[in-house]
Structures are given as C-alpha cells and as structure tokens.
Amino acid sequence: MIPTDISLFILLALTGFEEMLSQPLATLKLKLCSPMLTGLLTLGFMAKAAIASLHFWLPDAHSLAPAPASATLSGLMVKMGVYGMLTLAQFAIDTSTAYSILLVFGSLTAVYGGLQAVYQRDLKRLLAYSTISHMDAIVMLVALYIDSQAPLYLYAIMAYVAAHASYKATLFMDTGIIELLSHERFVDRLGYVHRALPVESLAALLAILTIFGVPPTAGFLAKVRAFSSVLHSMVEKSSTYKKLFLLNLKLATLPFSPH
C-alpha cells in the first residue's frame, strides 16, 4: 500500500486539501511535467496494478485470502492502478517518462507472469500470476494511450478491463467451490470434479475459453479491440512517414534557386 499512498498524497499535496474534497477529479488541472514526479506517481500506481518488481504481494494475497476476497481483489482492486494511470494521462505529465516506464516494465512483466503461471500447481497462485500477465497487457495499452492520446486505445482498455474482471472473478469463485468440495487446491491432486459440479465446471470452461479469446466471448472482443487499436496506430504512423518521405522527395527534386 505504501507506493500507492505516496502517489495519492503527491496528488493531494499538489491539489490542496480543500479542492480535493470539493472538486471533481476530472476538473483538476495539475502540472506534473517533472520527470521525477511523473516517475513517482507512475511507480505508485504500478504497485497497485501488480507490475514487476512491485508485483510480489499479489500471489501471496490470493493464496491466503478466501475465494470471494480473491475475486474482488483480481476483478476490482488491481484495476485501481490502471484507473490511476489513466487519471495521470489527463494531467500535464512528462509523457515520455510515463510511456517508457509503463511499456518496458509492462512488457517484461506480461511475459514473466505468463511463464510463472505455467509452473504453478496451486490454483489460486496460478490465477494470480495470470492476473499479473493480463494486467500488464492492459498497462501496455495504457502506455500507448498516454503516448498517442488515441481514443481507440481507451476503448480497448475499457473492454479488456471489463472482460478480465468477469472471467477472473468467475474462476476465483469456482476455485473456492472446488476447495470447499475437495479441501484441495493443487491441480495434480484433483480430478473428475465435473462429475460432482457440472454447472460450476461449465462456468469455469466458459471463463477459460474467454481467456483464450474464443469467439464470441468477451475476451475475444477485448483482444480484437486491442489488436485493432495497435494496427490502426501503425497504419497511421506508416502513412505519416510515407507522406513525409514523398514531401522530402519533392523538395529534393525541386530545381535549385539562388533565392
């Protein structure tokens, strides 16, 4: 909680206590152009979103918490870090610093979380590392949004957040039902659960297919949004570079004039 509190108290100090309690957050105009301020605020919200190397609290919290708390933790609380980063985007921040921090740490942690999830045998720790991986995919979209301010990235972030909250909360609740039934969370010691819990097993299967992005699930729509926003940005940049190249070519072929 300490890094996130540092970020919140920095915003409180820059805003003023009276304005913070009386004005909506969207109406505040803060200047955070200093790279140090931008870095501190970004790192604080990274801890809430469980981005390495501030991610270590999440697997332990999930493994110790009951299933409803884990569902709330993964479905709602870690998203507050993303909300904090999107809030920073509306202020005058050093965009290059925020973009670099979020893109570098987000891309590395997305791979790290996925690899760690492969080797987990505890269901809750497996889902916790999966949450870390997916949250960092969202954080990379936030970095691209901060850099370009393109609305497509914002729509992709909202779709991804809603899809992740739905299927991860479902899987954590299913894990709690399995634990109540078998008093066991380790994958190697479980089997034939679908015979005792057919409805819950179907819900878990649908949630897993949503993680895979199988059409027409919410995960598929979120990933289509994410890929289409990235591709649209690449096409726009390539067309801009092409126009600049043609402009430079025309300037280079103009006849020399002493004027």
Image (tube, helix red, strand yellow):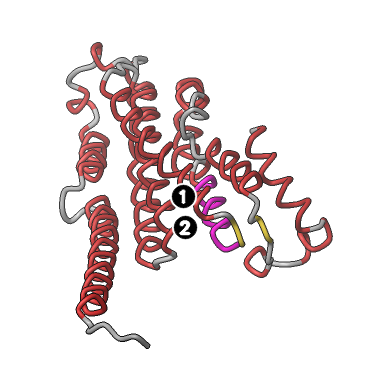
Determine which of the numbered discs, if any, sits on residue 146 in the image: 2
Q: Which residue is at a point 21% across and 74% down the rendered structure image?
A: 249
Going from N to C along the chain, the mark reached first, 1 or 2, is 1
Determine which of the numbered discs, if any, sits on residue 157 in the image: none
* Residue 40 percent location from the top left of the image: 63, 41
Describe residue 183's horizontal placement relative to residue 204 as left or right: right
Which image quarter holds the C terminus?
Answer: bottom left
* Total labels drawn: 2
- Element type at mark 1: helix
* Residue 105 percent location from the top left of the image: 43, 36
Query: How busy is the neighbourhood of tag 1: few (under 14 within 10 Å), some, or many (20 plus)?
Result: many
Q: Which residue is at a point 18% across and 56% down the rendered structure image?
A: 216
Q: Main secondary structure of the magenta part?
A: helix
Q: Are marks 1 and 2 in contact (CB under 8 Å)?
A: yes
Per the image, the residue denoted by label 1 is: 99
Describe residue 35's horizontal placement relative to residue 82 as left or right: right
Query: How busy is the neighbourhood of tag 2: few (under 14 within 10 Å), some, or many (20 plus)?
Result: many
Magenta-drawn segment: 80-91
Q: Nearer the viewer, residue 203 or 80?
A: 80
What amino acid is at disc 2? Ile
